[in-house]
């Protein structure tokens, strides 16, 4: 069918018509252009199909035009009959396998020596970001260095710096920002408030120390981190807070943790309004059950209940499940999303 559409271009009748109305030079030029197009088409189709280009001795009679007609017709038919379109889901996976570009973006990730935080550092670095790895205690220093070593193997221009800082202390944010500026320059692009603590006790056994520690780290820490970063936040900046599905379904014995994450989500909305004029976005991600050290602190019945209620695959989430969402929120592609809490729970919590 394709040949029947193309063949009139080089038929003798068509050439005689051109010769009758045009100069010899124009006629020659048109013939050369037509032959070049047809020859190129043949080579292209041979390349696509993987079929060796036929030799001239195999062509039918008729000179070069016969050779082109015979072999192009064969190859076009072969292509139309045997080519298989790329399925849409394969095309999507090929596209999604290419990371969004965060090259030269400067990011801070708190609570980054293990679990979700470590996964966040690795994904941001894979996309080219320079990342400050914040860890709390000296016993986590080796883990933080291990994360930095993994980033170094990427060899893609990403960098890390490591900072020990306890976010229950009010001077920690200034220390983290100062270390980041010293390592990567004055501007910061991305802040991920991931550090958190969890106490699981009945209310009558919960102490004021537990209360203070929970809200100091889970609420005041992100608040002061944001305040310290904003003067250096390069527009369009990205602030991403790690909340929890627990803020919405209220697991028993986790009232402090659930309340602190609910407070974080309220803060997220308010800051999204406050910082929007500067083109910054502020969002929260609420993971469900994720394979991590913190998951081990949850009662088995709570985890089992979440798995049964999870719409997708009935499984525990992975660090990468969360990291992909956070990395998207950190990218330019998320520019029209702000003040939102995204449930990263496989459908366990539908907001």
Image (cartoon, rainbow, N blue to C red):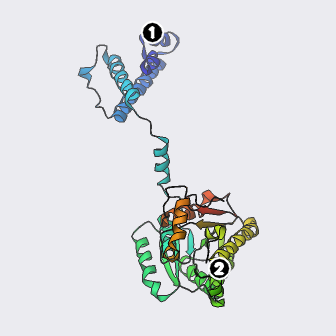
Residue 325: percent from the left, percent from the top? 56, 61
Is label 2 in a helix, a strand or a loop? helix
Rendered position, 241 above or below 312: below
Residue drawn 32% across the image and 20% down it: 67
Q: Is residue 56 above or below residue 328?
A: above
- Between marks 2 and 1 in the image, the one whose residue lies nearer the viewer: 2
Counting from the top left corner in percent of width and height, residue 27 is at: 46, 17
Q: Residue at x 42, y 11 (%)?
A: 12
Which residue lies under the disc numbered 2?
256
Give the quarter of the figure containing the N terminus: top left
**Residue 10 in picture, x, y percent from top left:** 43, 17
Q: First in sequence, mark 2 or 1: give its number.
A: 1
In the image: residue 340, left or right of residue 153: right
Horizontal side, residue 222 vs residue 34: left or right = right
- Nearest the viewer among 220 and 300 is 300
Helix, strand or loop for disc 1: helix
Residue in view at x 51 percent, y 14 percent:
22
Task: Using the image, tell me which numbered label, if any, was put on residue 264.
Answer: none
Q: In terms of image quadrants, where is residue 261?
A: bottom right
- Label 2, label 1: how many angstroms apart (C-alpha)? 88 Å
Total tally of numbered discs in the picture: 2
Residue drawn at 41 percent across, 34 percent down? 84
Residue under label 1: 13
* Labelled pair 2, 1 in contact (Cβ < 8 Å): no
Residue nearest the viewer, comparing 3 with 282: 282
Q: Quadrant of the C terminus?
A: bottom right
In the displayed orientation, state which residue is furthest to the left: 57
| Within-10-Å neighbours for mark 1: few <14, some 14–19, many 20+ | few
């Amino acid at each position: 069918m394709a040949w029947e559409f193309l063949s009139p271009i080089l038929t003798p009748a068509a050439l005689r018509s051109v010769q009758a109305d045009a100069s010899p030079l124009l006629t020659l030029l048109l013939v050369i252009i037509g032959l070049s197009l047809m020859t190129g088409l043949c080579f292209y189709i041979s390349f696509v199909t993987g079929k060796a280009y036929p030799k001239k001795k195999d062509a039918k009679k008729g000179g070069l035009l016969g050779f082109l007609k015979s072999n192009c017709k064969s190859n076009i038919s072969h292509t139309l009959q045997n080519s298989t379109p790329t399925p849409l889901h394969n095309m999507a996976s090929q596209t999604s396998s290419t990371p969004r570009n965060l090259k030269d973006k400067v990011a801070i990730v708190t609570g980054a020596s293990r679990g979700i935080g470590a996964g966040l550092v690795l994904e941001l670095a894979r996309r080219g970001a320079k990342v400050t790895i914040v860890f709390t205690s000296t016993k986590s220093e080796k883990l933080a260095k291990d994360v930095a070593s993994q980033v170094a193997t990427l060899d893609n221009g990403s960098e890390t710096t490591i900072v020990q800082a306890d976010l229950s202390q009010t001077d920690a944010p200034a220390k983290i920002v100062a270390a980041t500026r010293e390592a990567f320059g004055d501007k910061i692009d991305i802040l991920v408030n991931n550090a958190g603590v969890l106490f699981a006790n009945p209310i009558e056994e919960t102490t004021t120390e537990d209360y203070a520690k929970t809200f100091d780290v889970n609420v005041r820490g992100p608040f002061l981190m944001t305040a310290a970063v904003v003067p250096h936040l390069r527009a369009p900046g990205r602030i991403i807070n790690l909340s929890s599905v627990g803020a919405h379904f209220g697991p028993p014995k986790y009232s402090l943790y659930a309340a602190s994450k609910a407070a974080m989500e309220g803060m997220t909305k308010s800051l999204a309004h406050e910082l929007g004029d500067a083109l910054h976005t502020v969002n929260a991600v609420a993971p469900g059950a994720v394979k991590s050290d913190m998951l081990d602190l949850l009662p088995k019945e709570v985890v089992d209940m979440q798995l049964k209620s999870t719409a997708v695959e009935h499984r525990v989430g992975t660090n990468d499940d969360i990291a992909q969402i956070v990395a998207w929120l950190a990218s330019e592609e998320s520019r029209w999303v702000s003040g939102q809490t995204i449930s990263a729970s496989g459908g366990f919590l539908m907001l």
